[in-house]
Image: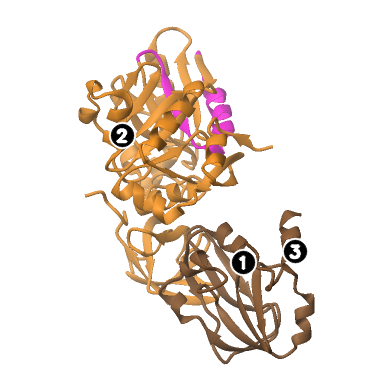
Amino acid sequence: MFPEELKYSKEHEWVKLEGNVATIGISSYAQEELGDVVFVELPKAGQEYKANDEIGVVESVKTVSTLYCPVSGKVTAINDELSTQSALINQDPYGKGWIAKVEMSNPAEVESLLSAKDYQSQLAG
Amino acid sequence: MLKKTALYKNHIDLKAKMVPFAGWEMPVFYPAGIIAEHKAVRSSCGVFDVGHMGLINIKPQTSNIKKAEEFLNKIGTNDVSKLIDFSCQYSVLCNEQGGVVDDVLIYKLIDHYIVVVNASNTDKVLAWLSSHAQDIEIEHLLDMSILAVQGPRSLDVIEELFGEEFGFNVLKRNNFLQVGNILVSRTGYTGEDGFELFIPLEEIEIIWDKVVEMKVQPCGLGARDTLRMEAAYPLYGHEYDEKTTPLDAGYSWAVKFGKGEFIGSKALSKEKEAGPKKRLVGVVLSEKNVPREGFKLFNGGAEPIGEITSGTFSPTLEKPIGLAYINNSCHEKNISVEVRGRRVAGEIVTLPFYKHS
């Protein structure tokens, strides 16, 4: 449910690191809590964000959840497929449900993210 | 400590996501998800555990049922004298200012009434009824619970469950039958044909399991909410509170001034003459953002003209919808809703959003 190779934020985003680029999405736990996702307000490509800035919103039938940028940097790509198929977040949160790619300006921030194990124990606590 | 309904274990076995609601631990959705559950009710059949709702028995201390009728006519806005045995009516309990204490269904049996109240208001209503009752027994029924079977296939399900010989097919809306010690009522909160079953606690698991085995979709509070919003049924704590009147919500049909005085009748009659200050409307937005409770409505100016009371994504219309109160003086069709600091264009639409064809 929580792939080992990913990092996680306390706000339930996941981060996949490839060189200087962080792909982000929301964790399987987050999508289960939200239920059916019906709309994703995506960040703007090209925009610079600092870590913990609000970069978007995930709306489910029942509730709305703010999306925070887990690392600082510039958004280089967004998952446009989500604008017509927001349910991808429920179906494949770590794959086709990715939200954005961020070119990190301060890769050291990754150190403060949680490992799969630590994220899981945070959920349990 | 949250209360559990008699079906708690069944929900866990079905892998429902449980949430606290009005002091109860209730299923909000099952693995199918709210949208699938909602669509099952619109196209086929769904079953809901409504065990959190309060059931209150109203019985005259003498055997004179008229005493109970008079009491309910004093306490509620609708006219209980119009109820025949084995039928029910919607009524609103108001305070002296006309504000809503609770909205309820009143069931008439031969020698007593059962009032079904909102879970969030059960204790308040029990105290309210007791403080106004004279020579009336008020009893919180704890040995009975409600299941709702809703959707176009619900008649088939009920017939399969109990047998066809009871004539469920000719049972009218807001009427009920007694089958053994179960009451089968043609009522619901979904905008669809359906039945609500009042079942002794010790039998409810058997009935639930039988219904679920008939491939009826278990539905949680999430779908209950989206279904009632499409049908534009008010929900206490959202469209109703102690400062909102049934006239504001558009329920003047349930306020019978002709029956004589009742609690709140003076205030309501004044409001009726002057015209309500606000009215309940439907809102749809031009974008996919969901209008959530508390979001403000504007008609171009700086001051809000109203506020969203309930909002969701409508699985039937496949777009976001909201219920809102707006100032009664506003008649614009085109409005905007402030969504997280940004005004999104929207439209006032006729309620309900969905009507069973």
Asked if residue B132 is among those painted magenta in the image, a careful observer would answer yes
Residue B179: x and y in percent read 34, 19
Please tell me in which quadrant of the rendered image residue A72 appears. Answer: bottom right
Which of the two residues, B226 or B92, is positioned nearer the viewer here?
B226
Query: Label 3's element?
Result: helix
Q: Residue B157 carries which label?
A: 2
Tag 1–tag 2 contact (CB < 8 Å): no
Which of the two residues, B289 or A90, is positioned nearer the viewer here?
A90
* Badges 2 and 3, same chain: no
- Chain A appears in which tint? brown
Work out how far the residue at label 2 is from the one at label 3, CA to CA, in angstroms: 47 Å
Work out how far the residue at label 3 is from the one at label 1, CA to CA, in angstroms: 13 Å
Name which residue type carries label 2.
Answer: Val
Which of the two residues, B166 or B98, is positioned nearer the viewer here?
B166
* Badges 1 and 2, same chain: no
Marked residue chain, label 3: A
Name which residue type carries label 1.
Answer: Ser
- Chain B appears in which tint? orange
The residue that disc 3 covers is A117
Query: Label 1's element?
Result: loop
Work out how far the residue at label 1 is from the one at label 2, CA to CA, in angstroms: 39 Å
**Mark 1, other Cα within 10 Å: few <14 / some 14–19 / many ≥20:** many
The residue that disc 1 covers is A27
Asked if residue A19 is among those painted magenta in the image, a careful observer would answer no
Q: Which residues are the magenta region?
A: B110-135
Q: Which residue is drawn at 69% across and 37% down?
A: B1
Q: Is residue B283 above or below residue B66?
A: below
Labels 3 and 1: the sequence-earlier one: 1
Residue B145: x and y in percent read 48, 28
Which of the two marks, 3 or 1, is nearer to us in this view?
A: 3
Marked residue chain, label 1: A
Q: Residue at x 56, y 63 (%)?
A: A31
